[in-house]
Image: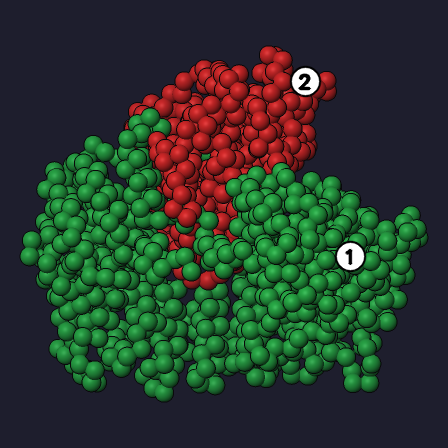
Amino acid sequence: MPEIRVTPLGAGQDVGRSCILVSIAGKNVMLDCGMHMGFNDDRRFPDFSYITQNGRLTDFLDCVIISHFHLDHCGALPYFSEMVGYDGPIYMTHPTQAICPILLEDYRKIAVDKKGEANFFTSQMIKDCMKKVVAVHLHQTVQVDDELEIKAYYAGHVLGAAMFQIKVGSESVVYTGDYNMTPDRHLGAAWIDKCRPNLLITESTYATTIRDSKRCRERDFLKKVHETVERGGKVLIPVFALGRAQELCILLETFWERMNLKVPIYFSTGLTEKANHYYKLFITWTNQKIRKTFVQRNMFEFKHIKAFDRAFADNPGPMVVFATPGMLHAGQSLQIFRKWAGNEKNMVIMPGYCVQGTVGHKILSGQRKLEMEGRQVLEVKMQVEYMSFSAHADAKGIMQLVGQAEPESVLLVHGEAKKMEFLRQKIEQEFRVSCYMPANGETVTLPTSPSIPVGISLGLLKREMAQGLLSEAKKPRLLHGTLIMKDSNFRLVSSEQALKELGLAEHQLRFTCRVHLQDTRKEQEMALRVYSHLKSTLKDHCVQHLPDGSVTVESILIQAAAHSEDPGTKVLLVSWTYQDEELGSFLTALLKKGLPQTPS
Amino acid sequence: MRFSHVSCAENCGLIMDPECSRLLPALCAVLADPSQAVADDTCLEKLLDWFKTVTEAGSSLLLLQENPCLVDLLSHVLDLKPQDVSPRVLSFSLCLAGTFAAQEDCFEYLQQGQLLLGLFGEAGPLSWAAWSVPTVRSGWIRGLRSLARHPSGLHFLGDSGALDALFSLQGDSSLFVASAASQLLVHVLALSMQGKAAGSPSPQGSAWPTCAQKIVDHVEACLCSTAAPQVTQALNVLTTTFGRCHSPWTEVLWGQLSPLVAHLLESDPIPAAHSLVDLLLSVARSPVFASADCGLWETMARMLSCLSPTQAGPLALGTLKVQHCPQALKSQAFKILLQPLVCILRATAQAPGPPGLLDETTEGGSMTVDTLLSSKSACVGLLCQTLAHLEELQPLPQRPLPWPQTLLVEAAVIVLQLCDGLAAPSSSEGGRLCGALAGCVRVQRAALDFLGTLSQGTSSWELMPQVFAVLLETLESPASSPTVLKKAFQATLRWLLDSPSPPTCLNLGPHAPLFLKELFPVLQKRLCSPCWEVRDSALEFLTHLTACWGGEADFREVLLASEVPKLTWQLLRDPESYVRASAVTAMGQLSSQGLQAASESSGHPEGQQGLVGELLHILSVDSEGFPRRAVARVFTEWLRDSHADVTRDTQWFVATVLQMVSRDLDWEVRAQGLELVQVFLAQTLGQPNPNCPYAVTLPKVTPPSPLPEVLRTLCQLHIFDFVFRALFDCDRPVAQKACDLLLFLKDKTAPCRGLQEPGDSSDVTSVEATLQRWQAGEQGEPLGNLEPEEVLAALRSMDLKGLQSRLAESSDHVEKSPQSLLQDVLATVAVLEENVADCY
């Protein structure tokens, strides 16, 4: 039974680390290979030992597809490819391929810095992993092998984020990764064509949320930053190197320009330059406005945002600093936070989610007295703000995408169970399709009915048309021919052509049947009676009595013989070809009823 | 030492400290309240980790008695209406109860209140709606797994009906749950047999203890089942059992079950073939069966002959790895493993090979090209698997003898030629193979890996021309993908470096120089590839080859006559940072070997000095860390190896590099700077005392100068400024390294008598004050021109040992502590509604 099987190893009823296994028409694909930032041990990676209990990973998996560069989608990739031992192809878009190693490297540096971890992937491993990547363009159909093809669609969310269609023959699955259905300052909205996949695997982070206006959030953000610097305070914005940071930079840059503000804005670790480079390189991935104005002014060449130097943190007066990492768990952002936390004039704005075990998580949960190393206590007097700028589709957006793609069924990942349940019901009601939400480790199996294309020879079609096909051209019609399966192609040809092509001689298959009749007359007389009976019954057919005593009706041959043991019984031997099967069965039934009595 | 034993134990979370104990009731109240949600699902996992550490270090019973809220939480979960229980909290409670019940006295304590029966018995969560949530089932199994450690736990499992539930959970919809159930059954079986007398068990079924008997009966019933999943489950339990338990009872178990296992081979197709292969290999590997036969080898031989080539491959490989396996079985397995390659060699044979070679290895091998090519994807899969299996086998001591090295090399070469589309087989079968494999990257990758491995152990250098030819073809081919090229470079490197040279030959052997002449134009071309991956792989290849062969006259001649050094120089300005970093390393290596002459003719008349300037330029302006790190590494190596450019003015070199490195935003560059300082100090002051008395001390470049003089030099070069700054670096590895360095210096300067004692006349207070400001994070102010006396005084006054032990701890150990975890869980509850769960 052909089927599609989906098993999340991560992102099944959670938002921790995406890793979904899909098996479609015998091909096995891994969708994303993410890491859970909330764990410090092996639990941060998906448990890959479940992928295949037997055999090598590289033989089992046909490819890995990465939807975008966030670590919960690609963070386990170097571990998987260089430490677990997957050696096959990895697909992602060009921007993802360029930016992914930067974030992986950033994370590696923090992990090693923070804990002096030895059992973690190295820079060389990240590079070796990235060398296995095959970069794809939007809407480009990429043949992974003869049967498996993939195609990327724009997903918004972050630069280079893509949804992927995975197709084998007529069966297909679409995986959205993270996506955003509304355009923002630097990215466009996700889009997919009406590809009618058998299954749509969609993220559901905001499954129950209708997000408030982005403009409000932006205004709020700018107001808070402005007020703080106006009163001489410093603003710290912990961010991850690339991604939403650029959205916030554009926002501040535009505001500074408009308000003619002079307060310095810094971006730490030289990443503005890098970001600038990539945003210029992948300008086609940004939104229309940025692309249009690019010639006059590159939106990513910031006038007001300068590179940060560690010494600047001690400078008096107001300033705004974007610093990495985003959860205040190590490095520069944490160092600046420690310096500025004691002053109530200052502010820290957390633009994203923080996992437990980080200072970011602590201050967001309202803790204001933080224990530091050596039993020191840091009193947080600065203002703490949380403003989510993550770009996910909300419930409305998800429904919109389902409507756009028109899938046969939907599977929800990357969300919380409770919220998923709500959305599941909504999707089932509105679109009348099945909707699944497997937990991690659970397999969803969908039966499919694959349609197999068959080529028909022109000769055969013409012959059929000559038999009156034209009158009801649009109605399905039974067509007889010989099916030739060769080199995974299916063709229907006339039997003559098939014989010729395959160099075969024709053999005739005949069905035979014995009909016993109570009759004492001789065989010849019996045959004559059969002939007369059939001649009168079957007026439209050619009935013949041959010199050897046998009777024929088209290809049907009837011979009369004596019964070996009972002289009062005669045996009629009836044989017919496959082509005359209907007539043969009719005749046998007719003869079994007996011959009409001859007038004596 | 600042940290006492107790405080360390507290930090490690080994004991329940008073603060945690104080927070526990609030935590339990939050967990027991169905209206409160715990924010981060990792929190509960981390809490369990902590409880596990605490109970492993002390008495669980005492813990429960001192913290009654814990038992209250468990009772409360049971008292709630099943629909009110949060699956996550329920799962947590099940795991927690199991953790406590792992100690027998605590188990009895919890049993008194019927808590365990309530949680794990049939009337508990097993019958609740929450059971449909996999996390709950998983928690139930984890709880039982912890609990099953002692005879009372074992009885509990037998009496509570848990075993029956486990049997059905083996077929659970969740892979995790099914696997955990299976593992637990094995654990229970092993535990109950462990409890039995150590004497030899009786083969009679009645001799098994109750739990074991029940499990064995279940396995037997499953093996007789016609449903494939049941057979698979039984086989999996047995595979794990024989893999983990190596006591004599396993032999009895196998004796009892092997007829049923053998019976499975009579079905066509064989049910659960993969699992059956795993079981047979698991039994074969068990030391219990090392001397006994038990019909195992016969079963394996039958299995090998029944399975399809793809299924038989893993069994054949596994069989060949078993040390004590009979020779006949090994030969059978090896033939099966070789079949696809032999089939290809036959189909593509241009002329009859060495007499009898194919016949010898393929006797009984009946695979035809038709079978191999029944479907293209199956053919590709089988070939990749075969190549990988043989690659795994090649370096093993137990590989079959005689090992057909020549045949394998030829096979790998022909497979590569088929993939490249360069083979010209005369037979129609060969033509079909060519059609199927041409351009197949998967097979190409596997064949190149295999060919690379074959470089080891090739004693005959006659094979080299054809190997080099195919590698060159692959490297040259415009159709080769970046991954294929990388593997081709790796295989080439292995063949060049491992290649045997005839005894008469003094250096590289007869083939390598000829090959190098052909290789370098290809290398040049690849250094100019539009793909960064290819440029990088080519540079890595060049670096390794130069490191090994830099001294060989043939190699030097070919390299210097080529454009490679010039191109490598140009790649220092590559747009891709990975390539720039590799180019830096390659140039560093070339320069170390004096192979950089070509750069003079390439617009860099300043030659060697030009390279130092270029590398310093990269170190100061490159926007990415990799190239800067590579430069810092190259400079350290140059200093270590007394590179001519460095020894020209070592002090200027060290001072200039450190000046740049100290400003670097990448902590790994700063750490590398400290490495450079360490090498410099070792050269001027002598090596650090080796821990091993037998360690070989490297010869010193120059005899150590008198200490006061050295210290003065270090001050003049601002090395102390750099190291002290690094000591208070916000990135811990830098601080750690700086601390180690200063301790080394302190150790070296301790006997220094030529300098004044602290406080005699020099004023160290300003130095100390600056250092304190640096420690507080204000590093704007420089130390200024230090005097050796000030440095020595500062070194003596600092508690470097204390700092070293503080730095040895993870920088987030405070945030990771149990107390911090409890505070976080409690704090989060209050604001959960405000900040809805989010992600990136």
Mark sitting on residue A268: none
Q: Which mark, residue B651?
A: 1
Comparing B185 with A494, the one in front is B185
Marks 2 and 1 belong to one chain: no
Question: What amino acid type is highlighted by mark number 1?
Answer: Gln
**Chain B: what color?**
green
Whether residue A69 can be seen here: no
Extreme residue in the top direction: A259
Chain ID, mark 2: A
Q: Quadrant of residue A503?
A: bottom right
Q: Secondary structure at mark 1?
A: helix
Crowd class of label 2 (few under 14; some 14 to 19; many from 20; radius 10 Å)? few
Residue at 89%, 56% (x, y): give it.
Answer: B598
Residue B73: x and y, percent?
16, 45
SS type, badge 2 = helix
Amino acid found under the numbered disc labelled 2: Thr
Q: Position of residue B753 (x, y in %)?
A: 65, 67
Q: Position of residue A143 (x, y in %)?
A: 59, 44
